[in-house]
Amino acid sequence: MSYKDSDIKVLKGLEPVRKRPGMYIGSTDIRGLHHLVWEIFDNSVDEVLAGYAKLISISIRKDGSITIEDDGRGIPVGINSTTKKSTVDTVFTSLHAGGKFDENAYGVSGGLHGVGASVVNALSEWVEVEVYRDGSTYQSKYKNGGNIVQPLTKIGTSLKTGTKITFFPDKTIFSTIEFNKSIIQERVKETTYLLPNLTIKFTDERDNTNEIFHSKEGLKEFVEYINEGKNALSSIISYSAKIDDIFVDVSLQYTNTSHETIISFANSVKTIEGGSHELGFKLALTESINEYARKIKFLKDKDSNFDGSDIREGLTAIISVKIPERMIAYEGQTKNKLFTQEALSATKKVTKSKLTFWLEENKKQASEIIDKIKRARDARIAAKTVREEIKKIKGTKQERVLSGKLTPCQSKNVSESEIFIVEGDSAGGSAKLGRDRKTQAILPLKGKVLNVEKASLKEILSNEEISVLISCLGASVGSEFDISKLKYGKIIIMTDADTDGSHIQILLLTFFYRFMKQAIEMGKVYIALPPLYKISKKSSTSTFKYAWDEIELEEYKKEFVSYDIQRYKGLGEMSAEQLWESTMDPKTRKLIKVNINDLAIAEKRVSVLMGDDTKVRKEWINENIKFELEE
Ligand code: 0RA
């Protein structure tokens, strides 16, 4: 939002928002719920970008509401000439109450937000606003989707300036109205990396916790955070410059992984599909590396240049540009892809000169990077050969390999069919006997699957377990993965509930994340949860229950009075019938749907999980893995 009292343009009631919330906030699930928070938060961030605010406080209240307060100028409190209401009331109760933008302001909104406050009001049970301005405190209150209960009123004096907004989301609109601590923490952390002048206080009154987020070193710390637990191949390279009114800010580091992580922002809003700034960066990176490799005669005259994709293997880079409103342009409808041409040339120019200089100054690191790039190129060429081999032997050797491994299901209907990837041959045996043969296919995996994070592409694709898995799923892999060819509606990982089991889960998840990411994004990947106990009533052989944790077990103990308990140490200890009724039967089983919303978070997850630092990994699993239980 960026306007004066007189600037408000198009006015409309809030009914359309309540009728079709999805059109305004994407969805009415947990994502949509947090979208409300970001609408308000982004307005405060705008005040930070404009140079007026440096503290934002977010508090989840005990009663389930949330407060976002900033120390900016405060929303203007004068009367709007069109609505004859105060600007605050206008902003909160009329749709599209956006305004003109200050030509040289680096606003978050890029002309896109501004509808935020009224949308939040429309989708809330109640909203309360306080504005501190001109020595006074003003307050307004709204109820049931934006009805004014108390128009903006001066309620006292104030020594500070700023805006404080509290809202309680409407439970008739959202499937959940419970704010999620870690979703908010991740976004807040990211914002402080982008804006080193900003401090964010985060309070959760529900569990009495309090955190302060602030980043002195900005993007450099962002890269450190993402690469935590990975082995670094280079130091962190950071640079920033202002060219033609565009601020470019970049931090990058090479790691010894095989994955590329580039995260970009335009005016502090994440550009998920990249665009001009990312392109400028990539072009400059490719040019600098190739020119340097030729200069040191690593590439001979007859050699062709390295591909950009080889150059970016193992690279983590954060690119943040600040562009004046008048230059902002996006490609397509979604505003996820920056189109500003000046951002391309600015980013390219700074990157080229900084990297060329850095490579010259850091010859040892440069040669390690170039060695890695060469290995990446060799692996890519090898993988291509392997894929072509897999295609060639279709129908002959591959079928023989498969027939010994996969127990297929009868149904060819993708939506009802499931494949269970089962740890070990003995559990595989029970699963084969116990399954519903119409819809459930079984693929037992022997021993530990390869660590895909550490292994080269070639090693991965030529690993027998993995290549059998790829063949069974039928949708190829990597850049050729085609989700429409997937043979199963659900891919279910079924392992023991112990350390080895969780290791195998992580390895498989990493594999899917790296090579079949869309399968995870589309919610096709699941983890089966076997029970830990079977508890049987002493007097009756046919009365028993499965328990998934101690709490459940205690409950059944009370119920049965005298009982026998069997503790399952692994799937192998269950009979085929027990495995079916406790873990495989769609009517009674517990499945966890693996879901990844955010590249930065996912990247961090996978890297920490697969990195060398087992302590960080354990801590991280305990704190962060959040998979949702399937209904
Ligand atoms: C437009 C103009 C001015 C402040 C704001 C918007 C503003 C909006 C929000 C929303 C949350 N926090 C906010 N802080 C400020 C200031 C106009 C002026 O003082 O000249």
Image (cartoon, rainbow, N blue to C red):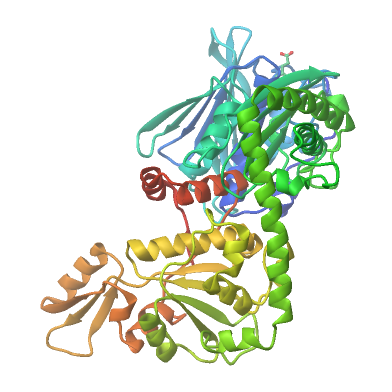
In-image side of 560 versus 496 (left or right): left
In-image side of 102 versus 484 (left or right): right
Which residue appears at 23% of the width and 63% of the height? 550
In-image side of 464 versus 487 (left or right): left
Choose between 188 and 24: the one closer to the eye: 188
**Can you tell which quarter of the image residue 521 is in?**
bottom right
In-image side of 225 versus 332 (left or right): left
Camera sees residue 150: no
Q: Quadrant where the N terminus lies?
A: top right
Placement of 558 over or under 26, stated as above or below: below
Placement of 49 over or under 333, stated as above or below: above
Camera sees residue 573: yes
Placement of 193 over or under 216, stated as above or below: below
Choose between 136 and 188: the one closer to the eye: 188
Placement of 523 over or under 444, stated as above or below: above
Which residue appears at 74% of the width and 36% of the height? 115
**Can you tell which quarter of the image residue 409 is in?**
bottom right
Which residue appears at 32% of the width and 72% of the height? 531
**Can you tell which quarter of the image residue 159 is in?**
top right
Which residue appears at 49% of the width and 78% of the height? 420
Which quadrant does ligand 1 occupy?
top right
Query: Where in the figure is residue 380, as x and y percent of width and height?
Result: 70, 57
Query: Where in the figure is residue 441, as x and y percent of width and height?
Result: 53, 84
Query: Where in the figure is residue 341, as x and y percent of width and height?
Result: 89, 32
Count of numbered labels shown in the rendering: 0
Query: Where in the figure is residue 338, as x and y percent of width and height?
Result: 81, 38
Choose between 173 and 53: the one closer to the eye: 53
Choose between 214 and 241: the one closer to the eye: 241
